[in-house]
């Protein structure tokens, strides 16, 4: 599927790639030289067979069909996007899921299937539903936008790929499993925790008013997955290790530990005892057997 963003006034068209940044900065794929537009104002990302709009914590907001964007919103053909009064129309050519020369695995359409070991990271905002109910849409947009932007920057800088954002959750992966990459995954978890602290400190009045803190959970796991394209040019992970990582992340609330790693992750990491401690085997939803869980207590370089 091809997607195009068109400036309604100038009629200039932009082909959308896997990730397209929108903002005042010259580094953005879609540059808007207007002081009312933030340097990194918004992002359009291809995932789940479609294109999604994310505000990145901009001061003046991003709007989709007249409504302020607070979390990821999927675009549809004919959508109108607005950034500080600059309006764009969205057009897509082709269906949301192209199936030419594709194979099928587990009910999902996969292209160019590869079976490969990966490191998987899942991070989720704790108590997001109650937070979204307690704060205003404008405040929520800036909080979520800051989190999306930090996740994109931190994860990409660590050599990983952001597979997708799912509301208040991010799924990312590395396709190399060795000591340096495993340590990079640990450092990424540490930086994501630091990011949550920054977001808390950036909006003290908002969180104080609702008596909440901005906290996240992070889970790390290694396993062999099917790695392929949900549509031509878009890659994603499919397999039990992905599901397990999501289940592991949900244990961060129950065990009151911000970063958890599976036994498989720790066994692949040399000198793993320097970085975490075992917390036993725990049952998770959808699995007959329990999961070996470790709490990460130390990060590389700390």
Image (spheres, rainbow, N blue to C red):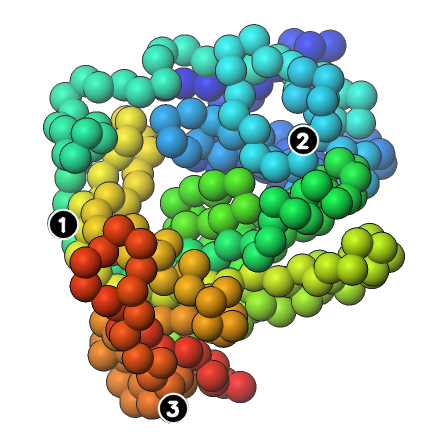
Observer-nearest of 96 and 28 = 96
| Above or below 259: residue 243 | above
* Circle 1/circle 2 CB separation < 8 Å: no
Q: Earlier in the sequence, mark 1 or mark 2?
A: 2
Residue in front for this viewpoint, 263 or 230? 263
Sort mark 1 into few (<14), some (14-19) or many (20+) by Cα contacts within 10 Å: few
Point out residue 28 in the picture as x, y percentages from the top left corner. Answer: 62, 38
Residue 123 seen in the current view: yes
- Mark 3: secondary structure: helix
Under tag 2, what secondary structure? loop
| Nearer to us in this view, 167 or 283 | 283
* Residue 274: numbered disc: 3
Residue lying at 42% horizontally and 25% vertically, measured from the top left: 50
Relative depth, front residue between 89 and 32: 89
Residue denoted by label 2:
69
Neighbourhood count class around disc 2 (C-alpha, 10 Å): few under 14, some 14–19, many 20 upward: many
The number of callouts visible is: 3
The disc at residue 115 is 1
Q: Which is more N-terminal, label 1 or label 3?
A: 1
Residue 273 versus residue 93 in the image, above or below = below
Q: Is residue 259 above or below residue 284?
A: below
């Amino acid at each position: 599927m091809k997607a195009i963003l068109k400036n309604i006034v100038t009629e200039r068209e932009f082909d959308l790639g896997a990730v397209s940044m929108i903002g005042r900065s010259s580094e953005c794929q879609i540059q808007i030289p207007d002081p009312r537009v933030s340097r990194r104002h918004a992002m359009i990302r291809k995932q789940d067979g479609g294109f999604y709009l994310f505000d990145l914590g901009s001061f003046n907001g991003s709007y989709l069909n007249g409504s302020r964007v607070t979390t990821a919103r999927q675009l549809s053909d004919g959508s109108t996007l607005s950034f500080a009064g600059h309006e764009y129309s969205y057009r897509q050519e082709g269906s949301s899921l192209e199936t030419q020369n594709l194979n099928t695995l587990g009910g999902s359409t996969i292209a160019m299937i590869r079976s490969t070991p990966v490191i998987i990271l899942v991070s989720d905002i704790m108590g997001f539903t109650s937070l979204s109910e307690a704060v205003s849409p404008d405040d929520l947009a800036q909080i979520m936008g800051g989190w999306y932007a930090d996740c994109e920057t931190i994860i990409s800088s660590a050599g990983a790929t952001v597979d997708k954002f799912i509301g208040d959750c991010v799924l990312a992966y590395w396709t190399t499993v060795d000591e340096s990459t495993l340590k990079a995954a640990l450092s990424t978890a540490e930086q994501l925790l630091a990011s949550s602290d920054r977001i808390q400190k950036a909006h003290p009045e908002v969180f104080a008013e609702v008596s909440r803190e901005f906290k996240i959970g992070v889970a790390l796991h290694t396993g062999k997955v099917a790695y392929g394209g949900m549509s031509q040019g878009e890659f994603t992970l499919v397999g039990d290790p992905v599901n397990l990582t999501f289940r592991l992340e949900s244990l961060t609330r129950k065990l009151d530990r911000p970063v958890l790693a599976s036994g498989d992750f720790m066994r692949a990491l040399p000198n793993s005892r320097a970085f975490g401690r075992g917390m036993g085997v725990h049952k998770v939803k959808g699995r007959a057997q329990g999961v070996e869980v470790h709490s990460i207590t130390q990060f590389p370089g700390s």
